[in-house]
Amino acid sequence: MRRRTFLATVAAAGVAAAAGARAQPAPAPARRKGRIKQALMRVNFGRDTKLSFDDMCREAARLGASGFDLVGPADWPTLKKYGLVCTMAPAMGVTIRDGLIRPELHDAIEKAMHEEIDLCAANLWPNIITVGGERRGIGYEEGKDRCAALLRRVKAHAEDKGVTICIEVVNSKYLDPEFGRADAIFDRLEWGADVCRRVESPRVKILFDIYHVQIMEGDVCANIRKYFPLIAHFHAAGVPGRHELDETQELNWRFVAQTIAELGFAGYIAHEYRPSPGRDPIESLRRCLDILDA
């Protein structure tokens, strides 16, 4: 065979092989039972991950997750590219320190919430997160009054647009911000439940963070049942250490998932754990998704 003919044949074979490789279908997403809709967060992939957000979304879709929590508008097109949902939009207008109980910030918070509600509604996203903030001398009852007063100002807009404002319960026990929220006013479920009752809106509910509740109150499944009508969303991470949901943790996560599923919960549970040192983050994701797949 002449050299020119040989090279042309090799080149053609290479093109055909490449085309064949491109034609191979992507691996089918993992099939989930569907009773629990699960979401991820960037932290699940580890502090030192080399993955881009596009890579994370591809893995999330492959593993059968529904979407991501706390993703800003700049990354929403990437979510949509992979058929994922922004299951909880990030807080706008508030910070962990300065939240809903600061009346001097209410006008600015109201404006930011209106804008975010409009953004979420336009993209068909269901929820936005918000926080009570640090007490800094404010009493619990006074804080309820202030929080409810602001939420009553925005509830009609949330109801009109079909977006739920979710107030997150946190723990005030641990001072390290990696593990707790020192001086947080919403550190007991009943505080947030009372706020929701005062606001009287189906679009103002609790973000039940299982990690924080286990630290502050325990009785996780009993509390889920008790406050279920007021819960719009869950966060999940193991105690101790805020690591994976497995046999190294205090809770029986399969039972927690079964409890939530049997109540007919229609929202999302987002994983907020940090991968344990030395573990493969993708394998940890697969295992944690399987554990909550009630």
Image (tube, rainbow, N blue to C red):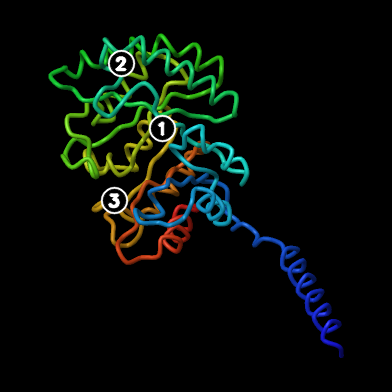
Please identify, in this view, whether the residue under mark 3 or under mark 1 is nearer the observer.
3
Q: How many marks?
A: 3
Which residue has dot 3 on it?
242
Nearer to the camera, 62 or 12: 12
Q: Residue at image x 54%, y 23%?
A: 119
3 and 2 marks in contact (CB < 8 Å): no
Three-letter code for the amino acid on which mark 2 is drawn: Cys
**Which of the 4 quarters of the picture holds residue 16?**
bottom right
3 and 1 marks in contact (CB < 8 Å): no
Q: Element under label 2?
A: helix
Which residue has dot 1 on it?
228
Nearer to the camera, 126 or 108: 108
**Which of the 4 quarters of the picture holds residue 138?**
top left
Which residue has dot 2 on it?
147
Q: CA distance from mark 3 to mark 1?
A: 23 Å
Q: Residue at image x 35%, y 12%?
A: 150
Q: Is residue 54 left or right of residue 195?
A: right
Q: Residue at image x 21%, y 39%?
A: 216
Does residue 118 sit above or below 238 in this rendering? above
Instruction: Using a 10 Å C-alpha cutoff, classify the residue at mark 3 as few (fewer than 14 neighbours), some (14 to 19) or many (20 or more).
Output: some
